[in-house]
Image: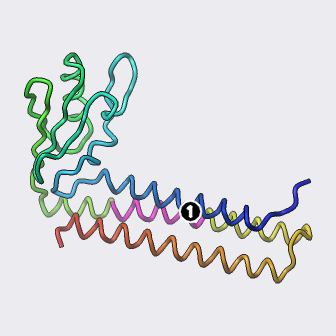
Amino acid sequence: MAVFDPTAHKADLDRRMNSAVEALKSDLGGLRTGRASTSLLDRVAVEVYGANMALSQVATVTAPDARMLAVQVWDKSNVQLVDKAIRAAGLGLNPIVDGQTLRLPIPDLTEDRRKELAKLASQYSEKAKIAVRNVRRDGMEGLKAAEKKGDISQDEQKRLETEVQKTTDKITAEMDAVSGAKEKEILGK
């Protein structure tokens, strides 16, 4: 039977909490802000060669200026499929086909759309915070179980619970900063 390892326990919790932060950053990266960003198309999947592939696997995405994205499709036969996938992604973008390149003008966001996107960013943040709270709960339960089995003392349990709480607070503050910055960017403040 394995003996409780506080260092491994903390490392596992840190890894899981940090992955929630990375997931939040990824989710927020896909939100339109009115400026061209290649991450806007990260979630676009194209059905080519009988499989769903990420856009980055069939084309190169660049941002030649603040109001335009360019998608250079590698295989000429996939241009229409990429065009269709971008239109179907629900991003409000209308590609202009120019040979093997698709130009995507980034339209200005209406005030209502900005508010919707800011609300969505807030929902992504809350979802990530819930994931962190679940990791925290798992960590606390693990510490209680280890103390009950006699693997750690009650004082050690309290000390480790304090560390878990400090980590949770730090990660939550980082998430607030990331989502707050994204909301300001979306609202144009």
Q: Pointer 1: what residue?
A: 17
Image height of 40 relative to 85, above or below: below
Image point 25% across, 35% down: which residue? 60
State the image coordinates of residue 48 (x, y, percent, origin top left): 33, 20
Q: With 40 as the anchor, is 160 left or right in this view?
A: right
State the image coordinates of residue 29 (x, y, percent, origin top left): 32, 54
Quarter holding residue 72? top left
Secondary structure beneath disc 1? helix
Q: With 49 as the anchor, is 131 left or right in this view?
A: right
Image point 41% across, 72% down: which residue? 176
Q: With 96 as the anchor, is 148 left or right in this view?
A: right
Q: With 137 as the anchor, is 144 left or right in this view?
A: right
Q: In the rendered structure, does residue 132 fall within the stretch colored magenta?
A: yes
State the image coordinates of residue 136 (x, y, percent, origin top left): 63, 68
Picture colour scheme: rainbow
Prevailing secondary structure of the magenta residues: helix
Image point 36% across, 65% down: which residue? 122
Q: Nearer the viewer, residue 106 or 12?
A: 12
Residue type marked 1 = Met
Which stretch is magenta?
A: 121-133
Split into 4 quadrants, where in the image is the C terminus? bottom left
Image point 50% across, 66% down: which residue? 129
Q: Nearer the viewer, residue 61 or 180?
A: 61
Q: In the rendered structure, does residue 116 fall within the stretch colored magenta?
A: no
Image height of 113 relative to 141, above or below: above
Crowdedness of circle 1 by 10 Å Cα count: few (<14), some, many (20+)?
Answer: many
